[in-house]
Amino acid sequence: MKNSIILGIESSCDDTSAAVIRGNHILSNVTAAQKVHLEYGGVVPELASRAHQQNILPVVHQALAKAKIQQNELQAIGFTRGPGLLGSLLVGTSFAKSLAMALDIPLIEVNHLQAHILAHFIKDANPSPPKFPFLCLTVSGGHTLIVLVKDYFDIEILGKTLDDAAGEAFDKIGKILGLDYPGGPILDKLAQQGDAGRFEFSKPKLKNYDYSFSGVKTSVLYFIQKEVKKNPQFIEENLNDLCASVQKNIVEILLQKLKKVAKDYQINEIAIAGGVSANSELRNSLKKMSKENHWNYYIPKFEYTTDNAAMIAMVAELKYEKGDFSDLDINATARYDL
Ligand code: KG4
Ligand code: ZN
């Protein structure tokens, strides 16, 4: 890999992030998370784009300063083109275009989902990168996919969620339990003090490689409504056990299907990616399952799981090597398939 110096910019949802990469070494990865959405219990698109506008310049400056790189040393600008919130994507896209134009260097568009998957190729993401072909369970707030990665840019979707994404399920159930947004990481933390065997929730019965999480959410909701009627303090008194049981249920759903795909495709290189791959139970269960099934598992370093610009810079680096550049009149796109 050539050691090109590239700036990556990510602004698809509620994190404004910039990173500088040289080859596959991350020199800096700076993220400003937006707190404005907390009181609304979810991301408010208008507030997100306004916060991106406020954050983007300081975040980029900080990323360059941390990397000890001058603007004129940059060889290309990579940015998230989609999928995501259009207003948010537009901020990163127009910033990246202007900077590429001002510096007269190539502009490189990046698919956010591809970036979550290819984050595994960042030098310090794993002790060693996965070998092609590998399976990657890609689980975030907006997507849940099992993909077959045959090469960097040859990725086939084998299964996906038919309704809610896994992260969305964590967040919606978190809301039912009265947790702040996003509920996923909070639920994970509380679950560590809880008994995961205490409560049983439903599991979908889909025959192929697809997922469904809306039934799980509804089964938790009905159960809670029933119990709270009998005891108004039910949630408070059982919160840790509820979190642990919900988490176990979601992780089992995710991994059972992954195991089926691995068996059918006879692949033992298994990776996870995306925000939900930060989940401690998913990480632990994958390790256990990998030992039982003789898989080589790949769990990215924590900072490359939730939204970050390092992964955008990594894909930009791979595209730069191929000379795969974008026109300066390229537009952001809210929907963007792999
Ligand atoms: O990849 P990401 O940062 O953004 C999207 O592209 O969607 O993923 C965010 C999602 C949220 O739903 C969040 O609750 C979930 O990842 N998440 C977690 C954990 N950390 C983040 N879910 C469960 N356990 C965690 N530790
Ligand atoms: Zn993401």
Image (cartoon, helix red, strand yellow):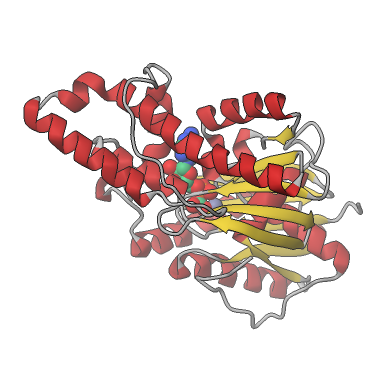
Residue found at the very far bottom of the displayed protein:
329
The one nearer the camera, 20 or 134, is 134
Is residue 245 among what the camera can see? yes
The one nearer the camera, 84 or 273, is 273
**Quarter of the rendering containing residue 109:** bottom right
**Picture layout, residue 268 above or below residue 230:** below
User: Left or right of 286: which side holds 219?
Assistant: left
**Picture layout, residue 301 above or below residue 6:** above
Identify the residue shown where x is 57% and y is 44%. 257
Q: Position of residue 192 (x, y in %)?
A: 43, 20
Identify the residue shown where x is 63% and y is 51%. 116
**Picture layout, residue 295 above or below residue 205:** above
Is residue 16 among what the camera can see? no
User: Left or right of 243: which side holds 97?
Assistant: right
Q: Position of residue 258 (x, y in %)?
A: 61, 43
Identify the residue shown where x is 49% and y is 40%. 253
Q: Position of residue 175 (x, y in %)?
A: 27, 41
**Picture layout, residue 125 above or below residue 196:** below
Quarter of the figure with the C terminus: bottom right
User: Left or right of 229: which side holds 38?
Assistant: right
Q: Position of residue 114 (x, y in %)?
A: 66, 58
Q: What count of labels does the image hold?
A: 0
The one nearer the camera, 203 or 242, is 203
**Quarter of the rendering containing residue 226:** top left
Residue found at the very far right of the displayed protein:
2
The one nearer the camera, 157 or 8, is 157
Identify the residue shown where x is 69% and y is 43%. 262
